[in-house]
Amino acid sequence: MNQEELNNKISEIKAKLIGYEQPLANRIYLSCEAENSYALNKFLFEEVPLRFLIATGIDSEDCFEILYHYAYDQTGCVVTLKTFIRDRENPSVESISPFLPAAEWIERELHDLLGIEIKNHPDMRRLILADDWPEGVYPLRKEAKK
Amino acid sequence: MKKTIKKPVLSVGPFHPLQEEMEYFQLTLDGEIVTDIDMRISYNHRGIERISETLQFDQVPFLVSRICGICSACHPLAYVRAVEELAGVKVPERALYVRTIITELERIHSHILWAGLAGHFIGYDTVFMWAWKYREPVLDLLEEITGNRNNYGNVKVGGCREDIPNELKPKILKDMDEITKKIDMLIKAVLDDPILHARLKGVGILKNEDAIKYAVAGPTARASDVAIDVRADDPYGVYSELDWNVIVRPEGDVFAKVVVRLLEVVEAIKIVKQAIQKLPDGPVAVEVKEIPPGEAIGHVEAPRGETFHYVRSDGGNRPVRHKARAPSYVNVPSFKASCIGQHIADVTITLAAVDPCYSCTERLAVVDGHNNITHDYEKLLRLSREKTTRIIREA
């Protein structure tokens, strides 16, 4: 697939997106709400298909964001799916590890460092924080700065 | 009454007996066969992403260069690529050449280091000693250019901090020719040795479909027929202007990974020689005053695989978020696929075959059961010196 074909393929899921930006030919940023994260990730990994890179979790004042980064190596394109988690009190998202084992570790890290609940994760336990680290203290959250 | 048989578990770590780094593997065994593997990491977590948010954009390269001692040109380059993409910075031509040359020199010494370690892990200490001797000229070159053997601190937003002096060009070409002779000898020795074939062929196979499921990167992926290489897929530096090959092997075993790395050294030498010959005149940096709000991505091909950084800015002078992903983060979980079904004796080399880098810079301390430090670094150092003095005196 060339870049144009890739753009067309990705636009198959436009209905589930709340944003689409392509600041450069080979950088695409898709935005969606948390409840569509599982289906969209499955599409990107299995249907397109893209290579999973990593996920970035961000504490953005009024919501949490999880950015799932994927690569399409034939054109050097990086496709990022920005998932917005609006519920700050009980942030949660569906795990994508059941179909993507490569995401297991980063989902454990998101839970450790940002306190986002990853539903139906096959092996949820601490990855980064020590065993005796206190519960409820999430180092990458903004309030942890104080 | 039914007897429950407990499965024996072999713990390797947390201070790995061979690799001498902090990692912890629990192997569940059935006789001599490994039936499951569990890994614990993060003994060396330093909170780098969090620290990035407290630094200014131009201070971050010095921080991330210390994520890893032998990928230390690649992490700052990936970060800087992201910031330059964010700010729309056009880096001068000569800087792209200098960055390419330093990254490839790093690849040469890192792969030769790994070849030596692999030899050491299977008991071939001569390979270990010779490989580490052959990589010395590369470290000397890096020291002449950047002032340091590791942690070069040469990359900055907008270009490079140090230039390669034109008087050094003949020496670099000569050193590359010398290393070529040694590497050819090493490659022939590995490809022909029947004992290495017996120890490494068919061992620790990572199948192509597992390589994709675990999203592995670098030589670990290329040795399992996954033809990915950031230098070719999303070119940076001057890779797209030079003549070189991506090395891919289909077998997926440890031997394939050895071959991929050694042949990549040959390609890296080709790249350095061409880059030196074509090195254009000009400045090695442009000044960058402001980073506008936005987000961007920077990725480079480190010796271990794709190093990926994401940077978000709000227009201030510190990153709002900086995500750094080292290739070992995706390569290490793939042990679940490559170690299960292996004999314990083969696990040692399989665990080393992805060239994991845990970056061992943590200080050691001894604590009692209540987390009070009883022996800190200073005290341990003193005890060690007293013991050495005593041993010498009593000898």
Image (tube, coloured by chain):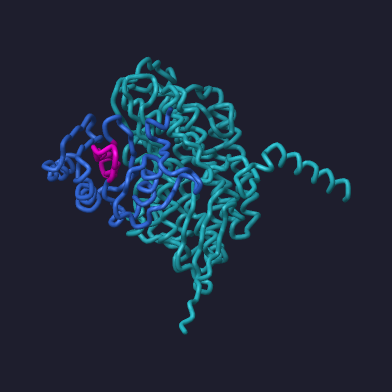
Chain colours: A blue, B cyan
Above or below A122: residue B31: below
In the rendered image, residue B67, in percent from the top left (x then y), is placed at 50, 37
Looking at the rendered structure, the number of numbered marks drawn on it comes to: 0
Above or below B73: residue B165: above
Whether residue A33 appears in magenta in the rendering, the answer is no
What secondary structure is the magenta-colored segment mainly?
Answer: strand
Read off the magenta span.
Answer: A64-92
Residue B278 appears in view:
no
Say which residue appears at 31% left-offset and 26% top-offset: B86
Above or below B382: residue B281: above
Whether residue A81 appears in magenta in the rendering, the answer is yes
Query: Would residue B131 be found to the left or right of residue B7 on screen?
Result: right
Residue B377 appears in view:
yes
Q: Nearer the viewer, residue A122 or A89?
A: A89
Q: Nearer the viewer, residue B282 or B181?
A: B282
Which residue of the protein is positioned furthest toward the right in this rendering?
A: B394
Quarter of the image for residue A80 reads top left
